[in-house]
Image: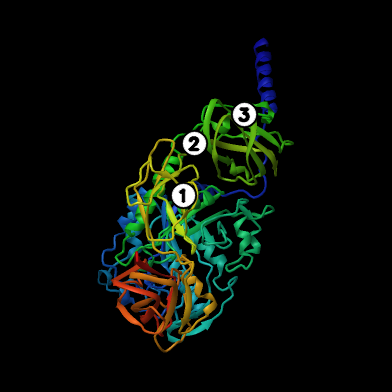
């Protein structure tokens, strides 16, 4: 009997403990699916645009191309996978079919595919090759399939939709696991359409039978997420420049959105009152174009630009999809690879040592005062634990004690998103010399938020969460001291002759020389713009004051300043805008009129007579260039009446290599110069000039 009483008492104690156990916070708003949670963890992966457009030098093919044009000379999908893996990427998405309709696999739905190309004598299957390469290198494999098909004669009719669905079925059932299916929002317009060469319109919302399309993906690849403007799993971020807004909700009113949605700017921030979990994928290309163009070999994104994109995508609650335009050989270009590795190396430095892990964390509120929801969960390195507050508490502070003055310039914060996205506003503070100082104030967090700030030496860091949609659930807080970003300086000069040296990180010093000698850490430090009006070679280096590490020297040549230059005459075009060709900025341009039938000339007054020994020409730097001068004539005069031709010739490969062109000639005195476009790249004689300059010797 006594034994039974003890047993019942024990049971009662257990029941009371169970009843009093604090429950986790209730979910808030829409929640991510398991496939979406897996996608969030990927963070960074590659887009590969490689298709017919690679060989026609276009971005959007018309659909009238021949399969004979697709013929890569060294195609190696293992090289793609190797590059992506070494760059720290987690997967590759391939343009299996772009808008021109050419298919990279031997589909049964059309003859417009690799099976009728010279590549591998028509026996190749690029999708199979890439899928196997991804498996070999431990990468996820994704498919881009354009709904729009400018080649197919049936586009716009129900017959095409059947083909589209069959193409999707082939891709989803023959190439192993697919992690993402990517549908472009560009739909309907002009095209070849089997030779009709006309414009066709479709209803973006209904024509492709999206419900059936989604059902197919769910059936054949249940773990794959589906991308489009409005999901249903992940969304476009509303731009192709590579950034999300600082406020970025992973939720949206999804049923309002459809491919080609005109309110696309809302995709950059999401909807605070969203009805579905629909996180943003931030996509951009490593070059100006999505497809490879030799003329962009010198325009690969710089390390500072790529770093900025990382922090404005992954650091703003998005995933980073970086496009690699594979070249006509069938390889990731060397310049692209170089910058990818530079980004990887810098990020490895930025996040080398985590400062907060294991340090004492305290909070103004802990859910039920229970350790399993305690502040220490926010910096324990376990993504499955989290600090949570009581149901009524949407405003609370967490403090991490660094124990001694410690340099910090990065904070990474993550919410426990299986329970939803909650944080609406927070402030970051640092205790410096015993006093609290506000470092930054921001809005949303979501899966991951990373803030960069000037280095502070703090003994404590605290995050004040000021507003949330429910009790807080913070799974991770990390702190870092990233090194200064050490890159070579750049230089620009205005027409007055003022030269500005620049580096993206203001903590970096710049040292320079003007006498042709090699700069060192002992050379003059750049503190203010330099006035350079005569021919001068500037050599400059960047120096990290923290460790005296320095870059190789970079050399800049500046000739006479253009302050007194004046464009006197042009064959055609707007004379008022001609200053753009002498503004010392190769990113602006001037052009003659479109459709002109004869060779175009410009005449410039240099302001006084100089001893000229050459001239320079910057071709237009626009994404879609036109009017590039390929053959030239250059004449000089002392009186604008009697002209002497001092140079004629060709700018070799200038269309594909749009860098500064330099031509030298025998020393000649002149005040006036004339440039003639003998031949230009285009159907007429329209000529474009980004910048023109001269080379002089002292009189």
**Whether residue 104 can be seen here:** no
Badge 1, how many Cα within 10 Å: few under 14, some, many 20+? Answer: some
Q: Is residue 471 above or below residue 323?
A: above
Looking at this view, is 191 or 481 the one in front?
481
Give the image quarter of residue 418. top right
> Dot 2: what SS?
loop
Give me the disc on residue 374: 3
Residue at the right extreme? 392
Outermost front residue? 699
2 or 1: mark nearer the eye: 1
How far separated are the C-alphas under marks 1 and 3?
A: 43 Å
Front of the two marks 2 and 3: 2
Of 633 and 381, nearer the camera is 633
* Mark-to-mark CA distance, 2 and 1: 20 Å
On the image, the x and y values in percent for residue 192 come to 44, 82
For marks 1 and 3 on the same chain, the one whose residue lies earlier in the sequence:
3
Residue 522 percent across, percent down from the top left: 38, 40
Task: Quarter of the image for the C terminus: give it.
Answer: bottom left
The residue that appears at 65% across and 62% down in the rendered structure is 255
- Residue 592 falls left or right of residue 666: right
Label annotation for residue 567: none
Residue identified by numbered label 1:
503
Image x and y of residue 420, in percent: 63, 45
């Amino acid at each position: 009997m006594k034994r039974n009483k003890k047993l019942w008492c024990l049971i009662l104690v257990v029941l009371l403990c169970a009843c009093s156990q604090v429950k986790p916070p209730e979910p808030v708003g829409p929640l991510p699916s398991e496939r979406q949670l897996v996608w969030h963890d990927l963070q960074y992966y590659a887009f590969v645009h490689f298709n017919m457009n690679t060989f026609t030098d276009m971005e959007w093919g018309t659909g009238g191309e021949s399969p004979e044009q697709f013929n890569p000379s060294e195609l190696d999908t293992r090289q793609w996978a190797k590059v992506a893996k070494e760059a720290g990427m987690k997967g590759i998405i391939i343009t299996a079919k772009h808008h021109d309709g050419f298919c990279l696999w031997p589909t049964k739905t059309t003859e417009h595919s690799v099976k009728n190309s010279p590549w591998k004598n028509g026996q190749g299957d690029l999708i199979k090759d890439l899928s196997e390469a991804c498996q070999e290198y431990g990468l996820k494999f994704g498919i881009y399939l354009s709904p729009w098909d400018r080649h197919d004669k049936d586009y716009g009719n129900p017959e095409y939709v059947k083909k589209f669905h069959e193409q999707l079925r082939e891709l989803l059932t023959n190439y192993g696991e697919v992690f993402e299916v990517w549908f472009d929002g560009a739909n309907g317009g002009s095209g070849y359409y089997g030779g009709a060469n006309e414009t066709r319109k479709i209803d973006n919302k209904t024509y492709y039978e999206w419900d059936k399309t989604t059902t197919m993906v769910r059936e054949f690849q249940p773990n794959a997420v589906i991308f489009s403007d409005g999901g249903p799993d992940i969304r476009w971020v509303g731009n192709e420049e590579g950034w999300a807004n600082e406020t970025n909700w992973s939720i949206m009113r999804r049923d309002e959105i459809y491919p080609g949605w005109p309110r696309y700017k809302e995709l950059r921030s999401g909807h605070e009152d969203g009805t579905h979990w629909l996180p943003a994928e931030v996509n951009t290309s490593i070059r100006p174009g999505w497809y490879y163009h030799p003329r962009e070999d010198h325009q690969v994104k710089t390390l500072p630009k790529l770093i900025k994109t990382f922090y404005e995508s992954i650091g703003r609650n998005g995933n980073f999809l970086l496009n690699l335009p594979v070249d006509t050989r069938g390889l990731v270009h060397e310049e692209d690879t170089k910058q990818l590795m530079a980004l990887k190396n810098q990020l490895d430095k930025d996040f080398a040592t985590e400062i907060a892990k294991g340090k004492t964390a305290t909070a103004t509120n802990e859910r039920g005062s229970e350790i399993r929801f305690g502040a220490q969960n926010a910096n324990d390195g376990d993504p499955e634990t989290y600090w949570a507050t009581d149901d009524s508490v949407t405003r609370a502070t967490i403090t991490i004690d660094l124990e001694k003055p410690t340099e910090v310039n990065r904070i990474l914060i993550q919410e426990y998103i299986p329970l939803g996205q909650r944080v609406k506003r927070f402030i970051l503070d640092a205790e410096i010399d015993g006093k609290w100082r506000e470092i930054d104030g921001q809005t949303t967090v979501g899966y991951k938020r990373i803030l960069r700030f000037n280095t502070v030496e703090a003994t404590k860091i605290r995050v004040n969460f000021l507003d949330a949609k429910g009790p807080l659930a913070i799974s991770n807080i990390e702190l870092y001291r990233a090194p200064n970003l050490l890159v070579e300086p750049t230089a620009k000069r205005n027409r007055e002759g003022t030269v500005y040296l620049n580096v993206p990180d203001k903590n970096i010093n710049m040292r320079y020389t003007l006498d042709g000698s090699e700069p060192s850490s002992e050379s003059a430090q750049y503190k203010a713009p330099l006035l350079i009006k005569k021919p001068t070679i500037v050599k400059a280096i960047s120096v990290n004051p923290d460790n005296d590490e320095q870059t190789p020297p970079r050399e800049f040549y500046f000739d006479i300043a253009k302050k007194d230059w004046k464009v006197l005459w042009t064959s055609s075009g707007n004379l008022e805008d001609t200053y753009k060709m002498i503004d010392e900025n190769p990113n602006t341009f001037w052009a003659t009129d479109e459709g002109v039938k004869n060779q175009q000339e410009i005449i410039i007054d240099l302001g006084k007579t100089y001893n000229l020994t050459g001239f320079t020409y910057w071709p237009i730097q626009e994404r879609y260039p036109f009017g590039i001068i390929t053959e030239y004539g250059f004449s000089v005069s002392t009186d604008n009446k009697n002209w002497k031709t001092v140079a004629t010739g060709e700018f070799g490969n200038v269309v594909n290599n749009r860098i500064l062109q330099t031509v030298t000639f025998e020393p000649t005195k002149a005040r006036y110069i004339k440039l003639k476009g003998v031949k230009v790249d285009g159907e007429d004689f329209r000529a474009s000039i980004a910048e023109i300059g001269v080379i002089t010797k002292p009189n």
